[in-house]
Image (cartoon, grey):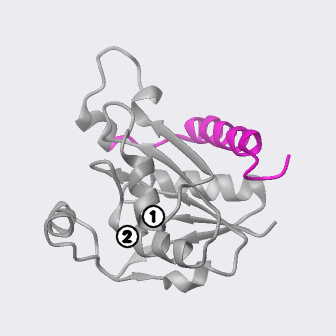
Amino acid sequence: MNIAVVTYSLTGNNAKLGKSVAAAIGATYIEIQTEKPVTNGTIFKTLVFGVVPKAKPKPAAITGYDKILFAGPIWMGMAAFPLRPYLRAVGAAKKPYGFLTISGGADSDNPTMESDLKKRAGHAPEFLLDQHIRTLLPAEPKPTREMTSAYQVTEADLFDLTETVVSALKKSGFTAE
């Protein structure tokens, strides 16, 4: 099975996780890079006006794979905008795909994530895993949004997160046993 792990990451956490998972399952790793840096202002303009900044590689680069596993952030219940053209490309090619995230800002699960992905790709993901930075932090003091958004995954975190993802991928049938 020819799988690509396609990542976009504002903080670096989803990119680290995607790269680690790609190595663990023997997949090709592809990192999306925006032409201009993403800022809170860029995110706001995208949410309000729908303008998606250009990125590379081009979305067509991912259509030669049997399956695509995305790793990226969820912003306000939606896939981060740099991922959206790639989700459309997967939908247009009718490719099976999965999505995983390690969310920094989410205070709880992302209940609209699956419906947003289905809307953008035209079909639901075969695999979906929503993990949270808050679970990596001590319970006390209670993690704040500022703490979770600023957190950088450690090597130990990455090892544990990757094991969780690989186990869930195998259990779901997205990858071979």
Is 41 placed above or below 107 here? below
Q: Which residue is mark 2?
A: 82
Task: Give the residue at x 86% y 46%.
Answer: 177
The overriding secondary structure of the stretch rendered in magenta is helix
* Three-letter residue code for mark 1: Tyr
Per the image, is 162 magenta?
A: yes
Q: Is residue 17 shown above or below 61?
A: above
- Quadrant in the rendering for residue 110: top left
Q: What are the residue bounds of the magenta stretch?
A: 150-177
Q: Mark 1 and mark 2 in contact? Answer it, CB < 8 Å.
A: yes
Q: State the image coordinates of residue 99 (x, y, percent, origin top left).
A: 54, 53
Work out whether mark 1 precedes mark 2 in sequence or the reverse, and give the earlier one: 1
Quarter of the image where one finds residue 93: bottom right
Identify the residue position indicated by label 1 in the image: 8
Q: Position of residue 155 (x, y in %)?
A: 58, 41
Residue 167 shown left or right of residue 104 in the figure: right
- Relative horizontal placement of residue 116, taking residue 173 as reference (left or right): left
Task: Estimate the x, y position of residue 22 in percent, counting from the top left.
Answer: 68, 59
Rendered image quadrant of residue 78: bottom left
Amino acid marked by disc 2: Pro
Residue at screen point 59% across, 42% down: 158
- Within 10 angstroms of label 1, few (less than 14), some, or many (20 or more) residues? many
